Image: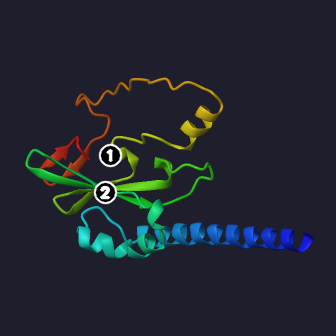
Amino acid sequence: KLAALLAVSMSLLVLSGCAIANRSAVTSSYEEGQKKVYIGMERRKFDRAMAENVSKTKRKHRRSSEAYQRNGMTYDIVYIRSGFVLDDATTDDEYTPYLFQDGTLVGYGWAAVGGKKTDSAHIARAKAGATNVQVKQVNNNGGGSPYVCKSQGGTSPYC
């Protein structure tokens, strides 16, 4: 029985080591890919820059892209795994969104897409039994949107 217990313990140790090594590889590949990313880059160049990160991210941890059209322009949001939070949930704070307008990178980070919907703090509060209170953000930029960035057609609140 002791030998079986030891074998199971060693297996769990090896498996947890593999998971940690994969997280480290994903994070490192994200950091390397991020160095090559710049506003104005074409989507195909972005895909090449982030290819290693995507290939190292397990399929179950990948997040689907989103797309929409507004004012005759097509917007794509690509989510790249950029970190890990050990909370047994997959939340927004583990990804970085990249916003493309008609195939050109116009913004990245959560501010570019209007903010996170879920993060590890939500999970911690829920586990603690806290309630979620919605707070309306008021801004003074006069445009009604807290985020504004430059796009091909001038200033766009959709970035």
Q: Amino acid at mark 2?
A: Ser
Q: Specify the quadrant that holds the N terminus.
A: bottom right
Identify the image's colour scheme: rainbow, by chain, secondary structure or one colour: rainbow
Q: Which of 150/119 is in front?
A: 119
Q: Where residue 120 sits: x, y (%)? A: 56, 44
Q: Earlier in the sequence, mark 2 or mark 1?
A: 2
Where does the image place residue 24, in percent across and percent down from the top left? 59, 69
Q: Which residue is mark 1?
A: 113
Type of the residue with mark 1:
Val
Q: Position of residue 151 (x, y in %)?
A: 19, 52
Residue at point 58%, 66% (across, down): 23
Q: Residue at x 46, y 48 (%)?
A: 92
**Distance between mark 2 and mark 1 Cα atoms:** 13 Å
Residue at the right extreme?
A: 2
Residue linked to disc 2: 65
Furthest-front residue in this view: 1
Q: Is residue 113 above or below residue 32?
A: above
Q: Quadrant of residue 139?
A: top left
Task: Estimate how packed mark 1 is, as few (under 14), some (14 to 19) or many (20 or more) residues with alpha carbons within 10 Å.
Answer: some
Q: Quadrant of residue 98?
A: bottom left
Q: Is residue 91 left or right of residue 79?
A: right
Q: Residues within 10 Å of mark 2 (few under 14, many from 20)?
A: few
